[in-house]
Amino acid sequence: STGRFIFVAGGGVLWQVKEPFANQVLVNNNTLTRWDGDGVPNRVELGQAPLFRALSEVFFATFTGDFDRLEETFDIEAGIDQSTWRLTLKAKNPNFSAIIPYVHLTGGHFLDQIVIAEGHGDQTQIIFLGTTSEKCEFGETEKGYFVQ
């Protein structure tokens, strides 16, 4: 899929998938909200979805550089060479490890790639292209997502 991924410190992560089909998902500290094709929001409290809560904590801690938070849940292996850094986060909790044994992150100036290993052998790979740290201009629709 392709789309736009917006992280707003204190606001959450808005993932706007453009292709192969339009989809919007907002994850903040408490909820995961997905909008259907008609724009109707479907909210899930993260307390009801421990897997989503754990993944959101990984995203937030990674994007804010909160290693103390990451170390609560994961054993961390880190490395760096001249222009690239890498982190491998291995789940400490056996129940979580059965679902997501590890998350591997690589980057340079920004986070470039996340690989999420799943307990049954699949992997999810997220590649970030065109990453900036500039002020993000929101349209009215995007502003509405963050105030839901």
Image: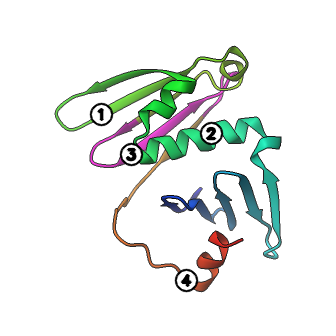
Magenta-highlighted residues: 106-123
Q: Foreground mark, 4 or 3?
A: 4
Mark-to-mark CA distance, 1 and 3: 10 Å
Mark 2 = which residue?
Answer: 55
Sequence-first disc among 3 and 2: 2
Question: If you read the primary sequence from the N terminus, does the residue marked by circle 4 or circle 2 appear first?
Answer: 2
**Is disc 4 placed on a helix, strand or loop?**
loop
Q: CA distance from mark 3 to mark 2?
A: 17 Å
Is residue 95 toward the left or the right of residue 18 in the image?
right
Q: Does residue 107 sit above or below 73 in this rendering?
A: below
Q: Residues within 10 Å of mark 4 (few under 14, many from 20)?
A: few
Using the numbered discs, state the Cα–Cα distance from disc 4 to disc 1 in whole angstroms: 34 Å
What percent of the width, then of the height, locates residue 21? Answer: 69, 65
Mark earlier in primary sequence (1, 3): 1
Location of mark 3 (residue): 112
Q: Amino acid at mark 1?
A: Trp
Q: Amino acid at mark 2?
A: Leu
Measured in 3D between alpha carbons, the distance from the residue under mark 4 to the one under mark 2, in whole angstroms, is: 27 Å
For badge 4, the amino acid type reads Gly
Q: Residue at x 34, y 62 (%)?
A: 133
Q: Which residue does the numbered mark 1 point to in the structure image?
A: 85
**67 or 133: which is nearer to us?**
67
